[in-house]
Structure formats: structure tokens, C-alpha cells
Amino acid sequence: MSQATTAFVEQHRERLLNELKDFIRIPSVSTLPEHQGDVVRCAQFVADALTKAGLEHVEIIPTAGHPLVYADWLHAPGQPTVLCYGHYDVQPPDPLELWVTPPFEPTERDGNLYARGAVDDKGQMYMHIKAIEALFAVHGKLPVNVKFLIEGEEEIGGKSIAKYVPENQAKLKADVALVSDTALYAEGMPTLCIGLRGLIYMEVEAKGPARDLHSGLYGGAAPNAVFGLVELLSKLKDADGVIQVPGLYDDVTPPAEAELASWKQLPFSASEMLSKEVGSTALTGEPGFSVFERTWARPTLEVHGIAGGFTGAGAKTVIPATATAKVSIRLVPHQDPEKIVAAFKAAVAAATPRGITTQVNVLSASPGLMVNPDHPAIRVAAEAFETMMGRPTVFTRSGGSIPIVGDFNQHLGIPTILMGLGFPDDGLHSPNEKFCIANYYLGIQIVALFLEQYGKGPS
Amino acid sequence: MSQATTAFVEQHRERLLNELKDFIRIPSVSTLPEHQGDVVRCAQFVADALTKAGLEHVEIIPTAGHPLVYADWLHAPGQPTVLCYGHYDVQPPDPLELWVTPPFEPTERDGNLYARGAVDDKGQMYMHIKAIEALFAVHGKLPVNVKFLIEGEEEIGGKSIAKYVPENQAKLKADVALVSDTALYAEGMPTLCIGLRGLIYMEVEAKGPARDLHSGLYGGAAPNAVFGLVELLSKLKDADGVIQVPGLYDDVTPPAEAELASWKQLPFSASEMLSKEVGSTALTGEPGFSVFERTWARPTLEVHGIAGGFTGAGAKTVIPATATAKVSIRLVPHQDPEKIVAAFKAAVAAATPRGITTQVNVLSASPGLMVNPDHPAIRVAAEAFETMMGRPTVFTRSGGSIPIVGDFNQHLGIPTILMGLGFPDDGLHSPNEKFCIANYYLGIQIVALFLEQYGKGPS
């Protein structure tokens, strides 16, 4: 049967790509108020695409933030139900000057589609919709029951969907969730991600003098908010990357020996990662841990941005009154976000220098988690992947965070298949984000095959 | 004779203030390219004012940066020559939202004139011009020879005047320079400033990854430019404010016992400074030194601004590729700027974390200096101050920097009278900068009296 959907994809290549380009052209940057209208337009685009694909009960659901989009098709009695999730919002494109072509004008180069949102997550989410369309075209019906729930706040913490899921457990009831928002471990290597880090995102604000002061007249006697914030932040992590927040590592459990052993089989070169992906003079991180452990199985603390005082061209000799940093902590399974937030706030208070007052604002907090690779749906997904790509599926983790996976686990009691078709160097959240066009077509076929096979039960 | 110029000021109060307001309304922000036209317009305003006051050879001198304005009157043979210096450029007004009234719309409140540049230095520089006008009005001539040299780059390092002075030693030949860009120690207390700190202003740039990276995928393995800069800066100064740059304190000499003793006679309350001027939870600085020592006689290191990564609204989970800080070191007499720059660069290199590369750009560097309070012109100035204010003149230092004073000393071989009429809480470089209007009128009279008395020789 897979050959029929493959033929469908072959036959409609140009249209499938053009539709994706139209989707990507909408600059649905969820964090920037000036893109509010684009976000709404993008939700409508998704709803229309779901309707055209053949789904029913298509609904744009208003929220306190950006709208959710729901749709379903429930005419396969006795068959399992798959909940397809994705997000139509994207990260801001800045710094704009580093893009080779405009971020919201999807451009083909070397077999890739370059644009903000190409792989994260518009291209991958659209694979699901197009797989449904292919199945309807080939079979006139779907092999399983399907529900779609698409959000517009994934890049800003996903507050609305986190509220919606527990309030709509019956409506969203399913056997498994399907998410395509991760990457293949390497080109040609079918990969299912079974572990994710959680994320606590915070702002730390420091205040010193009541107003900016002349650094000549007051320098030596007045506290400096920028330097106070610098002092404070420097105490939260040591030079090796070990987080200096008391209690932070208490609930961190190391991966099982078998999992660690499987990671050692994965092709990996630290020097290639350094030169091709990171591009700095050295990799960094906790001594005694491999890069896989440091990025997949260890908590990290990062400063995403900092601002304070005079930052224009030239010179201004002020002692700044205020400064702010955006800080996150990535969590591994078993770490409780609330406990970690409390520990972080205590550490900030303890590290706040004399003359400075600080405040921590929590923007979002979600736990890390693991899924069981022996679940029937995961096994079918692994087989579909293997069939289409001709190699055994590998199981990895990701250092990134998909909070909804935790919500599906907690409130719907279902595991999530993380079936990603990205590449590790796709530049998520960076300038020149891309998606391999061949993977887009392949993903549509794999999702279609998975749904067909899942309708039949595991082999 | 002072009564005649006093009468002149009384008679023209309204016009004298309105003219100053017109001067202040020109937003001559030297550091911001978008104000280039305003800076040029402001130079023309100064030239016109010098002409109207009765000075000759008025000249707008183009430079590589902003224009200088020169004028003179040299018809008092046998009499000394006074070189009046001031600057017509101002600091940027941001943060704009903290101004009670617009920064470039001078507004009278409670006997003060509120505006950017009111006291630093437009109001004070204009006192000199109006004193000349008063002397011509009253005497038909000046009691001494006078030269004016006014610059438009004081707030951005004064490169053009620093080049002009050594190249024009004959033209600028004088016996003493007169500068009004400092403050009275307290209301009603005539004050001459005899010491200034120098200033080295630098930018420190840090680079980590070649591009912004996803903090989930790379967090734990990739260096973070913002955190690298934070780590580095935190190592340059300890929590007490002691600078951790090897060699920095080598040439620092303590003030003489007599000077330290005189400072103890000045009215001062650290708690009032904290509550009325600084407004933080505590004063800070080196243990074992008084506030006067810390702000007047000790070098300091400040971070004036910092920027890097994502600083917009909401959340963006990047590991930033670059970060920049504006950093200055204030110098005391005997410290060599070049030696300190070299020591700072070495300290930055030594403190640069693994995976990060740094660069230091020096924007300006000038030494600290002292003037001799027994110089005849200083004595006449102290007497004029005392006569007009009815109290003995006190000698103080300032923690600020007026690089031109060092240039006059080095290239023209003359001392500078720092005759400031500001108040310590005038908010230089801050929102709601002000100048006490009574001090403006008083300053015109004191400058006129000083020139009259200097023409007669010390009493």
C-alpha cells in the first residue's frame, strides 16, 4: 500500500512544495506583538489545509494567547486513534543581516528549503496534513482514527495548549500522539527520539541606583546594575558549565548502561560538531561527561540575552540603574520544575551583590521526560521508518524541549512518537534555517505508511 | 566694578535665560549620527553668540569629527590672556520615558531649568559668553585678553580638540584656562576643583559560536558568548569594587595628609548621598577608603552597558554568538593611560573563557591630573568666588574627567581654573538634568568679576 501514497507524492511534488512555501511565507512569530495579525492568518491557513485534506470538525479555537486549531476524522471503529500535534508559530528571525535570503521568502538552494519555520515546525507539521491527504486520495478513507491539535505558542512556552489539554481530555482521547519536531540523527538514519529535556525560562532583573548616574561622580561609591547582574550570573555556573545552584542536581539520574552503550554506537565526531555546527574555538561543558550526556541527559543553564545601560554607538559614561537577562534551565527526567525554580530563586537571592535588588520572573516551566520504546505504536513507527529508509531505526534523545509531550503523558495518559525528519544542522532558531526538501516528501510517505501499518497492528 | 556687571545681569534676566533656552533646544547629541545636523547647527549658534558678545576672529573650524568654535579679543596689551573652554555637545537623553518634561524643551520648575545640557555644559559655557557681553556693555572693552575654544565632542572623547591643541600652540597661547563644567560642593559654597580623574573608555566584544545556536540542542557543549562575557567581566572587579587587573594600582598615590584633612571638613552625609542621589539599597566601594577617596582619588572600573543575544519581549532559546560591553576605567594622577590599557587588555585575555574569543577596542584614553591652588589665577578666581558668595572658597576634586584640562597642561603649559556652578544633584548624564537658574546668573557675575580682578592682579 505504501507504493500508492509514494506515487501520490511523486505525482504532486510541485504542488506539495508550493503549498508549504505559502504556509512558510506567513511570518507567524509568536513572541512579537507586531506579528499578531500574521499569527491569526497562519491559524486560518492551517484550518483551511486540514479541511482540504479531508478532515472534519475543523475548528479555530480562541485562547488567551494565540489560537489552537483542531480537526478530526473518526470513522475507523475498532481502530486506534492517533493525535497529530504540531505548531504553526516560529521563532523571531533576528539577526536579519545574517540571512542569505529573506527569512519569510522560502528559497530553494542545494536541495534545501531555506526559511524561518521551514523545519521548525511548519515543514514537519505539514507532512502530517499531506499524509492524510495522500491516504484519502489513495484509499478514500483513513486506516485509523485521527485527531489534529495544532498550536501557535510553542516557541513562547505553549501556555494555551497546556491549559486546553487537561480541560478537554475526552475530546482529545487517543492511543498515541505523533509529533514531527525533531531531527534524524544523521542523513539516511531513521531515528525516533525517546527523551526530551524540560525547560524553565526566566527573566532576571537587577536594579541598582534609582536612575542612571554619572560614572565619574559616583564611580567608586554607587552600585552598578549591569555589573551587579554580571557578578550574580557568574556565580550561577562555573567555568566548566557546572551549575552552582544548590540542590539542582539532586534528582538527576544517569541514563541506563544499555542506553549509554547504544549512544556509543552512533556516528559522532566532536571535531566535526565544533567546526561544522558550533564554529567556536572549543566545545565546552561538564568534565567527565560525553557530548551526548551533556546535551541529552544533563541539566544546563544558559543566558539567552542580556541588556542594560548604554549600548548605542560611541561612549556614554553612566552607571546603569537597571539590567535584565533571559536565563533558562534545561531539565532532565525526574527533575521537578517547581523545585528547580525555587532553588534558582534562592541562588539568585544569595548571589545578589550589595546595593543591588533582583527579581526573577518565570515565563514557562516544563519537565523533561522519556517514552517507552517497546510501546506498540513506537514499534510500528520504527518499522515504517525502517521500511522507507532501508536501515534499522535508532533511538536517541534530544536536548530540546517539547512541553506538550509531557502534557499528553500526564493528562491523556498516552506516549508520543517523536518522528522527526530534520537534520542536526538545519539551524533551528538561527539565521538560514532550512529543511531538506527530499525529507519533506519522505516524511509524508513515512507518516502515511505508519498510519496504514498502525491500522493493521504491529507485525 | 562688579556692581555694574551685576546690574547688567539684573536688567537682562529674561533675555539671558531665553537665549540659553534657545541654545539648549538644539539636540546636539554628539554620539548619535542622526543628530549630526543638530551638532552643526549648534556650532553655528555658538559662533553667532560669540560674535554678538563682541568677540573677534570668530571661526567655525571643521574637524574629522564635529566642528570647533574659536574667537578672541586681544586688545589688552600687557594684560594676561584667559582661554575660555566649554563644550556644546551633550549626552544622549535616553531613557526618554524617565524625563518629566522633554529633554530638549528646557522647562523651569522650582527655580531650576530642566533639560539635557542645562548644566553639562551649555548653561555653564554660556555664562562665559554672557560675562564677556556684560563686560563690553559696562566697560566698552575687556580687562584682559580673551580666547574662546569650544568643542562639540567632549561627551565622546574629544578627539578633534586633542589634535587641534598641540597643532595650534601659538594661536592658543594663554596664561590660564577657564572651564565651567563642574559643581559647587554644596549650595552657597564657592568651590574650585583642583583634581580630575582620567578616563579610558573601551568596548569589549566576545564571540562564541559562529551563529546563534538552539540552546536545547547545543546547551551543554557549545560556548555562550553572553555568559563568556559575563564570566570575563566578573573577574575584572571583585565584589568590593577592587579592580582585579594586575598592575592597575601600581602608580596610584594617596592624597597628601593636608588634602585628606580638608576633605574631612566638608559637609557630607553618606546616608543622604544614598537616599537623595544614588537611591539604591547601599553604597558600595573599596573597604578602608572614604567616599571622597573612592570617588576622587581611587581608580574605578565600570560597565556602562551590555548587550547580546535575544532581548525582546518573551522567550527565545538561543545560545548567543556575540556579546558586547562598554567598559571604562577612571584614572587618578600619575597613572599612565597607555600602561593601564595594556594591563586591561592582558587581564581580558587572561580572563577569556574557553571557547570564547575577545577583542578590546579603545575609544578614548586620558590621564587624571591636579592643578596647583597657589597659582595667581587660581587665587584671583577663589577671591572672586568668595566676594560674590560671601564665604571662603573650598578646594575639592572631581571623580569626573575633563580631558582637555590635561591637554592644556601638556601642550600649552597652563593650569586650568575649574569654576563650576552646578550642584551635585543636577543629574548630569541622567534623565531630568537641571541647572539652578540663580547659579546661571551668579556664574555670569563671578566670571566677569574674575576677569576684572585678574586684569588688576591678585590682591
Image (tube, coloured by chain):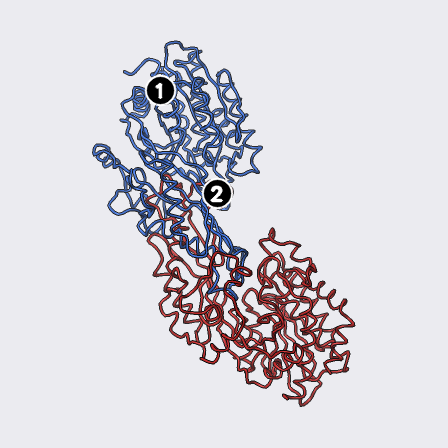
Chain colours: A blue, B red
Q: Earlier in the sequence, mark 2 or mark 1?
A: 2
Label count reads: 2
Is B196 positioned to the left or the right of A75 in the image? right
Residue found farthest to the bottom: B78
- Image quadrant holding the C terminus of chain A, namely top left
Q: Quadrant of residue B150?
A: bottom right
Have a look at marks 2 and 1 and say if they share a chain. Answer: yes
Is B267 positioned to the left or the right of A388 in the image? right
Q: Is residue A283 visible?
A: no
Q: Is residue B78 visible?
A: yes
Task: Kindly identify which residue carries mark 1.
Answer: A450
Q: Quadrant of residue B28?
A: bottom right
Q: Identity of the amino acid at label 1?
A: Phe
Tag shown at residue A100: 2
Horizontal and vertical percent for residue B280?
Answer: 50, 56
Mark nearest the camera among 2 and 1 is 1
Residue found farthest to the right: B11
Horizontal and vertical percent for residue B104?
Answer: 67, 58
- Image quadrant holding the N terminus of chain A, namely top left
Say what secondary structure mark 2 lies in.
Answer: loop
Is B308 above or below relative to A199?
below
Q: CA distance from mark 2 to mark 1?
A: 36 Å
Q: Count residues near mark 1 (Cα–Cα under 10 Å), then give few for <14, some for 14-19, many for 20+.
A: many
Q: Nearer the viewer, residue B444 or B407?
A: B444
Q: Identity of the amino acid at label 2?
A: Val
Horizontal and vertical percent for residue A244?
Answer: 33, 48
Is A427 above or below relative to B119?
above
Give the letter of the chain under mark 2: A
